[in-house]
Image (spheres, grey):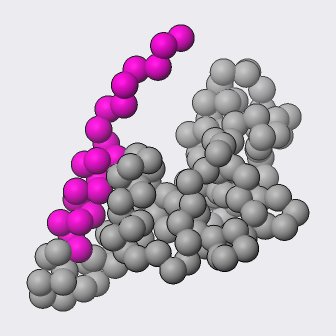
Amino acid sequence: MAAAAQIMWEHDCGVVPVVDAEKRVVGIVTDRDLCMAAYTKGLALARMRVGDAMQAPVFCCNEEDTRAAIHEAMRTHQVRRIPVVDASHRLVGLVSLNDLALDADAAEGTVRTHRITEVAETLAAISRHREPVAV
């Protein structure tokens, strides 16, 4: 987990996709996942494996997906980041809500207005409280 935290620090991000030997996405781990695992297990990050904290399975988008499809996936799965895979299901990138917001801000005119509205609607859907999980 320490290596995942280092990647997040060096790349100024809060998430790292976890891939297998063929670069296929098998999980995803966030900075919050790392913190909560360290806290609940009472161990240093260097003493734990990413597999102990990663979320799996992971919903991915295809590199051909439209902006609208990515927004819909984020809303449906209530996630702020989605790995992007190629036709062979290999990781080729990651799209975050921040990316979509910056893209919207860079647009002009009615396209900008539409994209900003789309980002706001996605953020609202992601932020809705989920049903409590029975313990």
- Asked if residue 100 shows in the view, the reply is no
Quadrant of the image occupied by residue 110: bottom left
Residue at position x 28%, y 84% in the image: 106
Question: 16 above or below 33?
Answer: below
- Asked if residue 14 shows in the view, the reply is yes
Residue at position x 56%, y 40% in the image: 32
Residue furthest out toward the front = 87
Measuring from the top left, give residue 63's x and y in whole percent: 55, 77
Question: 44 above or below 73?
Answer: above
Q: Is residue 117 magenta?
A: yes
Measuring from the top left, give residue 68's x and y in whole percent: 33, 70
Type of secondary structure dominating the magenta stretch: helix
Q: Nearer the viewer, residue 86 or 108?
A: 86
Quadrant of the image occupied by residue 129: top left
Report the quarter where the N terminus lies: top right
Quadrant of the image occupied by residue 59: bottom right
Measuring from the top left, give residue 128's x and y in whole percent: 29, 38
Q: Nearer the viewer, residue 128 or 61?
A: 61
Total number of numbered discs in the rendering? 0
Q: Nearer the viewer, residue 131 or 4?
A: 131
Measuring from the top left, give residue 46's x and y in whole percent: 83, 40
69 to the left or right of 113: right
Q: Is residue 30 magenta?
A: no
Query: Which region of the structure is painted magenta?
Result: 115-135
Q: Nearer the viewer, residue 106 or 39?
A: 106
Residue furthest out toward the top = 135
57 to the left or right of 115: right
Residue at position x 65%, y 25% in the image: 39
Residue at position x 23%, y 74% in the image: 115
